[in-house]
Amino acid sequence: QVQLVESGGGLVQPGGSLRLSCVASGSLSETNLMAWHRQAPGKQRELVASMTTDGSTNYTDSVKGRFAISRDYAKKTVHLQMNNLKPEDTAVYYCRVRTWLTLRGWRDYWGQGTQVTVSS
């Protein structure tokens, strides 16, 4: 069983920065993916950024050039550095890990979410 714990959310003014962190406990497959999603009130959850074990990254267009995802593979941790934050970035941010389970295939695990509020 994999558990994820996020931290780093909070209230920040427009133009400010926050760094989110997510630590995974339990075993992960050698090849896996860690990602950040977000869900604003009244909207669907969307993928913000992802990073595989080979270093490949993917970002949603609205955060390119402002957000950066990084991983510490040894510590099973993923970070999301968020710069030049905008009010439209306000959402609950969720960490996800996709890992391979023997005989069961790929499995997604989710964190409990951390609130990010961008407001003056």
Image (tube, rainbow, N blue to C red):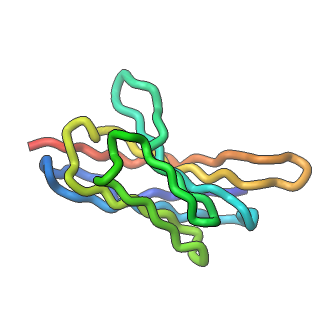
In this view, 80 is above or below 108: below
Q: Among all residues in the image, which is located at the extreme bottom? A: 74
Q: Which residue occupies 20% across, 53% down?
A: 84
Apparent side of residue 10 relative to residue 40 in the rendered image (left or right): left
Picture coordinates of residue 52, whole percent (x, y): 61, 59
Residue 68 in the figure: left or right of residue 13: right
**Eyeballing the image, is 41 above or below 74?**
above
| Nearest the eye: 111 or 86 | 86
Front residue (pair 103, 51)? 51
Residue for point 33% across, 62% down = 19
Q: Is residue 30 left or right of residue 13?
A: right
Residue 13 image offset from top left, x and y in percent: 13, 49
Residue in the image at 39% along x and 24% along y? 43
Q: In the displayed image of the protein, which residue is found farthest to the right?
A: 103
> What percent of the width, then of the height, locates residue 75?
57, 75
Residue that extends furthest to the top in the rendered view of this protein: 42
Task: Identify the residue at horizontal 29%, vertical 46% (top origin).
Answer: 116
Q: State which quarter of the image contains the N terminus.
A: bottom right
Report the label total: 0
In the picture, the quarter occupied by the C terminus is top left
Residue 112 image offset from top left, x and y in percent: 50, 47
25, 101: nearer the viewer: 101
Residue 56 sits in quarter: bottom right
